[in-house]
Image (cartoon, helix red, strand yellow):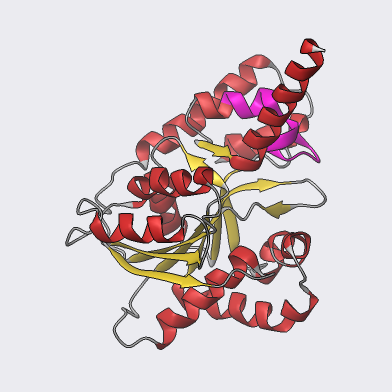
Amino acid sequence: MNFIDKYRSNNNIHNSDLTLFIKNYKKIISNHSIANNPNNKKIVTIVACHTNTLLKYNAIINNIPYLIFPNNDIIIINSSNEKYSNKLKRYITTKSVINTPNNKIIKYIEIPNDKYIDIGKYIHALNIIETDESLSKEYDAVVLINDSIIIKKSITHFYNMTIKMNKELYAYNDSSEIKYHYQSYLYAIKYNAIHKLIDYFNSHKFEIYGYKDVINKIELELNTIYANDSDCFLKIAKLPCNINKNIYFHNDTLYNLLLNNEILPFIKIRALEKKDKNTHQNTNMNIY
């Protein structure tokens, strides 16, 4: 990672440097994309979702296969009584390819959606893991992923890097929008450190009233909660071309470069909806 750190601190970036940056990350991904988890570390992935639209439902259906590999249990926690809640439940219970002996969704949970959105669902699932005697307590890591993204390519490298780096908190990428932080759509926590997130949430939940508060009180503070032992895979927050930007909304050039090279293999649903809305508005303007 020495080159990557050097790149981040260099204010005079040339195309050759960017090419090398991409080349180095592609090499890291290639070297950490073995899907059989050779160290046999046990992971549980918690998927928080809110299937109120067909797009959200399809995103979850799309994402599940990318989470299926040995020694990774999956817990899906969805909002109850939403338009596509029952459809997702039926899909999961009837799709035999999902529930194989070594790769299984061990629980599908529904709870009412509330002001805590994804973090509330994560905490609910984490408490179940800790208290349900039928569930394993021997996980090495917990991966938390929400339904704000559509996965386009394998993310096995993230799981393998999570195990290799062995951090209390390991996120997919960082950002310097508002302040330095890790984006919260995909991150992993050591199983023996999940109490820190739970305790922090319980101490601050009375300050949360909706989406913006979850961003300000949780996402922007993850690296503070785990200040002594955290890192991320894709270090882009301090790239000169990406300072103070959200990669999904404010930097199409860098985003498309990372997406096309399968380094940032995600489509952000809100960004997709925003672009569709702008396209629709522009079309209407052209008509009139």
Image spot of residue 76 (x, y percent)? 42, 63
Judge whether residue 207 can be spotted in this image: yes
Quadrant housing residue 62? top left
Judge whether residue 10 can be spotted in this image: no
Image spot of residue 71 (x, y percent)? 27, 61
Verify whether residue 252 appears in magenta.
yes
Question: Count of labels shown?
Answer: 0
Main secondary structure along the magenta-highlighted residues = helix
Q: Is residue 287 above or below residue 34?
A: above
Decide which of 26, 57 is in the foreground and name it: 57
Quadrant housing residue 11? top right
Residue with the most extreme front position = 288
Q: Is residue 106 above or below residue 84?
A: below
Range shown magenta:
242-257
Q: Is residue 279 above or below residue 102?
A: above
Residue 216 shown left or right of residue 115 in the figure: right
Looking at the rendered image, the quarter that the C terminus falls into is top right
Decide which of 240, 158 is in the foreground and name it: 158
Residue at left 48%, top 69%?
Answer: 190
Looking at the rendered image, the quarter that the N terminus falls into is top right
Residue 72 shown left or right of residue 239 in the figure: left
Residue at left 34%, top 41%?
Answer: 33
Verify whether residue 286 appears in magenta.
no
Residue at left 78%, top 11%?
Answer: 286
Image spot of residue 234 (x, y percent)? 57, 42
Image spot of residue 122 (x, y percent)? 53, 70
Quadrant housing residue 85? bottom left
Residue at left 36%, top 45%?
Answer: 66
